[in-house]
Structure formats: structure tokens, C-alpha cells
């Protein structure tokens, strides 16, 4: 263990970080050890990670001193923020800055920052094709991440900027799965027009991150974009139909209708889909599943993921 390179993993009990911790532990001869960071070392999920062989250490991204302690002695860190826990871009940026400062203080050799595009580079605030949200953002949960990249470069932290993609797990946990319409038929509702939505199994993000940590020479100080497969709404619906064995159609709606759905964050997600639709050449073009496969040979395409997870998808 002592000669292994320790990776401190934020969000270790969650989707992205959990995938990375499991990937490290599944490769005992890989030269890395997993330090799983959590606010509650006694939670069932934390105990499960300890049982699998992770070192479990307390850290709260809202408390920078705990981050510094948790990063000390590590070789690298996986940094991710938790927008949907608080809906605050300012908090997300403050948390990212604390992570970068803690990484610098610990002298880390390689950090992966799980980021997304600052959409304001494509849609400036005065562009009224989509509303400005929270005063100064177009897609708050994207913009705050992209606007935080510089914290890592400012601190001189050797960083890989990892552009992630839409989790297919949102069809299970985020209420985005197929729902019955007034006609009684199942439909998947995504305002993507005929453009492709890059998607990925959440656990594959962590596996890709592991591939990045294994190859620092290639990936330190670079930006890497991943997806499991890029599919149109019609292609997603066709795969649902095939795997679920019942008809699922694609319900293409305008982004403004999605924004009006009223659930917390509907406006943010409506803008997000519009950004992905209107700038598909850049957004989808950057995310190449063949490249992600080189990082993670077990990368799933949508049909594989859906076949494994179909029973977890709540169908009304
Ligand atoms: N859903 C998508 O399609 C998608 C796609 C791309 C990017 N993202 C981004 O992914 C990020 C979230 O990552 P995720 O999905 O891996 O998270 P997640 O599954 O929701 O898990 C988050 C974990 O982070 C921990 N956590 C929460 N608040 C914390 C805090 N204050 N300090 C330390 N740990 C804390 C929690 O662990 P403990 O309770 O054990 O502390 C929790 O288990 C969001 O910012 C989102 O924008 C989402």
C-alpha cells in the first residue's frame, strides 16, 4: 500500500467519484490506492467503500481546511462539485477554488477537475435566444464549472479538465425516463430537435478518469471530453422500444416548454438542452466515444447500459 499512488476522490459515495473508487479498487496491481472522501465516514455507502478496500476520510467541500487535510499525502485528486445539492453557481465556484487551493497546498501531481462548458462563450448574456438565469448565467450548472477552470491553472496545479456528458442514469434517478402521454403511449421528452445528445453511464465517467490517471504524461494540462454514445432523441426512443419491448416515441418539444415545466432547475436544464442542440457541432463534436473507449475499455453504449438497467427505470 505505501508505495501506491493515493488518489483522493471527492463525491466518492456518489456517481462520478464512486465509479473512480471502484475502478481503482478493481485493479489492485494498477499502482493506485483510493482515498474516498465523504462527509460521513459512518454512512452505509462509506462503510461499503471501506469494505472494498478504500481508505475512507472525512471531508466537506464547504470547509476548505478539511479538504487540505484530506488531500495531504496524496498523489492526485478527483475534484467534482455538487450543483444539484444547492443550485448555487457561486457556491460551486467557491468549492472549486477551495479544491484548487487544497491541491496546491498538498503539492498534488495530477488533479482531474470534472467540468463543463461555460456556455456564455457561445451565448453571451445579451443573447436573448434563451433567458439569463440567476442574474449572470445561461446554464448555471455548466457556466459555474467552466468559469472555475482558471482556479486550477491559476494555482499551477497539474490538471486534466474532464468534460463529462449527460448521464443515462438520469432516466432512472432524475425523472427523465419515458412517461405516458395523454395518448397512453410512452415517450421520452428531450428538447434536442434532430441533434445528437452525448450520453454516458455515470459509472463510466469514473472509469475514464482512472484511464486518465494512468496516463499523466498524455493528459496533464489538457482538456478531455467523453461520452458513451451520441444519439438523437429518435435513436434513444428506438433503443428504449427495442430493449423495453414496448413502443416509446421521441417527444421533441421546444426548449421554452421544457423551461416551463416548473420543477426545480427546469429552466437551467431547458437552457442546457438548447445549448446542446444549437451548438451540437461544438458540444457533440468534442465528445468522441471512440476516444473514451481508449480510456475505459469497458465503456458502455446506450443499448448495453439500458439492457443492464431497464428494470430500474420507473415507468408510469
Ligand atoms: N446528472 C448528469 O447528467 C450530470 C452530467 C454531467 C455532470 N453532472 C454534474 O455532476 C455533479 C455531481 O456529481 P455526481 O453526480 O457524481 O454526484 P452525486 O452522485 O450526487 O454524489 C454526490 C456525493 O457527493 C457528496 N457530497 C455532497 N455534498 C458534499 C459536500 N459538501 N462535501 C463533500 N461531499 C459532498 C455526497 O457524499 P457524502 O454524503 O458521502 O458526503 C454524495 O454522495 C453535479 O455538479 C452535476 O452538475 C451531472
Image (cartoon, rainbow, N blue to C red):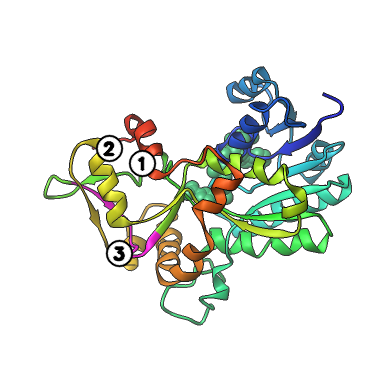
Disc number for residue 208: none
The residue identified by callout 1 is 303
Q: Residue at x 40, y 67 (%)?
A: 277
Q: Are marks 1 and 2 in contact (CB under 8 Å)?
A: yes
Residue 195 part of the magenta segment: yes
Residue 176 lies, in percent from the top left, at: 35, 47
Estimate the spatial distance between the alpha carbons at disc 2 and disc 3, rounded to whole Å: 28 Å
Find out whether residue 194 is within the magenta segment. yes
Mark 2 or mark 3, earlier in chain? 2
Q: How many C-alpha atoms fall within 10 Å of the one at disc 3: few (<14), some, or many (≥20)? A: few
Gap between marks 1 and 2 measured at Cα: 7 Å
The C terminus, quarter of image? top left
Q: Label 2's element?
A: helix
Residue 240 seen by the camera: yes
Q: Observer-nearest residue: 211 or 255?
A: 211
> From the viewer's perspective, is residue 121 above or below residue 111?
below
SS state under label 1 = helix
* Viewer-nearest residue: 195 or 49: 195
Give the farthest residue toward the top.
51
Range covered by the magenta-colored residues: 186-196
Which residue, given by chain and number where applicable, does mark 2 sit on? 243
The residue singled out by tag 3 in the image is 257
- How far across and down, in percent of the image, does residue 44 sit? 59, 21
Disc 2 and disc 3 in contact, CB within 8 angstroms:
no
Asked whether mark 1 and ligand 1 are closer than 8 Å, the reply comes as no
Mark 1, Cα crowd under 10 Å, few <14 / some 14-19 / many 20+, is some
Q: What is the spatial separation of the Cα atoms under label 1 and label 3, in whole angstroms? A: 28 Å
Q: Which residue sits at x=38%, y=61%? A: 196
Q: Earlier in the sequence, mark 1 or mark 3?
A: 3
Left or right relative to 209: residue 131: left
Task: Name which of mark 1 and mark 2 comes first in the sequence.
Answer: 2
Amino acid at each position: 500500500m505505501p508505495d501506491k499512488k493515493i488518489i483522493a476522490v471527492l463525491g466518492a459515495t456518489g456517481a462520478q467519484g464512486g465509479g473512480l473508487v471502484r475502478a481503482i479498487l478493481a485493479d489492485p496491481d494498477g499502482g493506485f490506492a483510493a482515498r474516498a472522501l465523504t462527509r460521513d465516514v459512518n454512512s452505509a455507502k462509506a462503510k461499503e467503500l471501506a469494505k472494498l478496500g478504500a481508505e475512507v476520510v472525512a471531508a466537506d467541500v464547504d470547509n476548505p481546511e478539511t479538504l487540505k487535510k484530506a488531500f495531504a499525502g496524496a498523489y492526485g485528486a478527483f475534484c467534482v462539485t455538487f450543483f444539484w445539492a444547492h443550485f448555487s453557481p457561486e457556491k460551486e465556484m467557491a468549492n472549486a477554488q477551495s479544491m484548487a487551493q487544497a491541491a496546491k497546498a498538498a503539492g498534488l501531481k495530477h488533479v482531474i477537475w470534472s467540468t463543463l462548458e461555460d456556455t456564455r462563450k457561445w451565448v453571451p448574456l445579451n443573447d436573448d435566444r434563451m433567458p439569463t438565469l440567476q442574474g449572470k448565467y445561461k446554464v448555471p450548472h455548466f457556466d459555474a464549472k467552466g468559469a472555475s477552470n482558471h482556479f486550477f491553472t491559476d494555482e499551477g496545479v497539474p490538471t486534466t479538465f474532464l468534460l463529462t456528458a449527460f448521464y443515462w442514469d438520469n432516466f432512472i434517478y432524475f425523472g427523465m425516463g419515458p412517461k405516458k402521454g395523454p395518448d397512453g403511449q410512452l415517450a421520452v421528452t428531450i428538447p434536442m430537435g434532430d441533434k445528437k445528445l452525448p450520453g454516458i453511464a455515470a459509472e463510466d465517467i469514473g472509469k475514464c478518469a482512472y484511464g486518465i490517471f494512468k496516463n499523466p504524461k498524455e493528459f496533464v494540462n489538457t482538456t478531455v471530453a467523453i461520452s458513451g454514445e451520441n444519439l438523437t432523441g429518435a435513436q434513444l426512443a428506438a433503443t428504449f422500444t427495442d430493449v423495453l419491448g414496448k413502443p416509446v416515441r421521441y417527444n421533441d418539444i421546444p426548449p421554452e416548454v421544457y423551461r416551463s415545466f416548473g420543477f426545480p432547475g427546469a429552466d437551467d436544464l431547458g437552457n442546457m438542452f438548447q445549448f446542446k442542440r444549437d451548438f451540437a457541432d461544438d458540444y457533440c463534436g468534442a465528445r468522441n466515444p471512440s476516444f473514451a473507449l481508449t480510456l475505459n475499455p469497458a465503456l458502455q453504449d446506450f443499448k448495453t447500459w439500458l439492457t443492464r438497467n431497464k428494470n430500474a427505470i420507473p415507468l408510469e
